[in-house]
Image (spheres, rainbow, N blue to C red):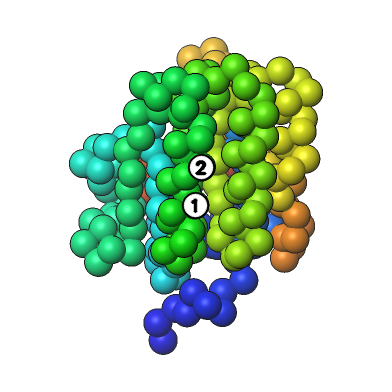
Amino acid sequence: MAPNRKTNKVISAHNTELDSRMGGGLPVGSLTMIEGGSGSGKSVLSQQIMWGALQDGFIVSLFSSENGVKSLVTQMKSIDLDIFEFLLMGKFKVYPMELSHLGEQAVEALVEAMQKEGSMGRDVMVVDSFTSAIIHTSNDQSILHFFEECKRLCTKGVTILVTMHAETMDGDMIGSIRSMCDGHVVLRSSQDGQKLVKTLEVAKIRGASSVTGGIFGFDVEPGWGMRVIPISKARG
C-alpha cells in the first residue's frame, strides 16, 4: 500500500539505525536545528531525512545555499539517495539561494520564500544552511523573527529542519534559539590520529515516540549513505 503522508505522525529517515537513535523519527510539525561545523555532515543528515520524507509521500522544499539542483542530484545519488524522480513529479522543490549576496535582507528574503511555500501546502522545509544568512546580518531580532516564523509554520503542520554553525552567534542568542526548537541535533568531526571521527548527538527531540540515542558515531560511505557505528569503532 502506498504511504499516506496525511496519517504519518513522524518524518522517518528510512535508515533503521538512524531512526532508532532519533526517537523513531522527527514528529510532524516540529522545528529541528541541525548544528555543526564545516564538514561535520549536516547536509548529508538533512538529505537523508528529506529522502525518507519523500519515500513516505511528503512534499518537500529545500532552500539551499550549499547546492544547485544539478550538484544536489549528483551528490545525493552518490550516497544512494536518488531524488530525480521526485523532482520530475514536483514532489521535491529545490531553491538555490545566494543568501550572502542579499546582505541584511537575506533573513527576510528567506522568511518570505518559506511563507510562500507554506501557502502552497509543503509538508517539509529544509534550510541548508542558515549560516549564510546569519553572517550577513547584524540584527539579532531578524534572526529571532526567522525562528518565530518557522514555529508559526510548524503550527500549521509543516516540519522544518535548519542547519547552521552555532559559533556564528553569541551564547545568549544560540541559547534562545535552541530553546525554541523542538529538536536539536549536534554533529561534530575531529581528527583522531590518522582517522576523521564523526559523531552525532541527539540533544533533544520533543515529542519523540521513543527514547533518543544520545551520542553515536557515523560514517558516510559512497553508494551506501549514512551508517551508524559504535563510538569505539569510529575512533578506531
**Placement of the N terminus among the 4 image quadrants:** bottom left
For image coordinates 21% across by 62% down, the residue present is 88
**Image quarter of residue 102:** top left
**Image quarter of residue 146:** top right
The residue to which callout 2 is attached is 111
The percent coordinates of residue 130 (x first, y second) are 51, 32
Instruction: Please give the label number shown on residue 23.
Output: none
The residue to which callout 1 is attached is 115
The local secondary structure at tag 2 comes to helix
The percent coordinates of residue 109 (x first, y second) are 45, 36
Q: How many marks?
A: 2
Q: CA distance from mark 1 to mark 2?
A: 6 Å
The kind of residue on which mark 1 rests is Gln
**Residue toward you, 160 or 109:** 109
**Mark 1 vs 2: CB contact within 8 A:** yes
Return the residue found at the far bottom. 1
Q: Is residue 86 left or right of residue 139?
A: left
For image coordinates 35% across by 34% down, the residue present is 97
The percent coordinates of residue 122 (x first, y second) are 45, 62
**Residue toward you, 109 or 194:** 109
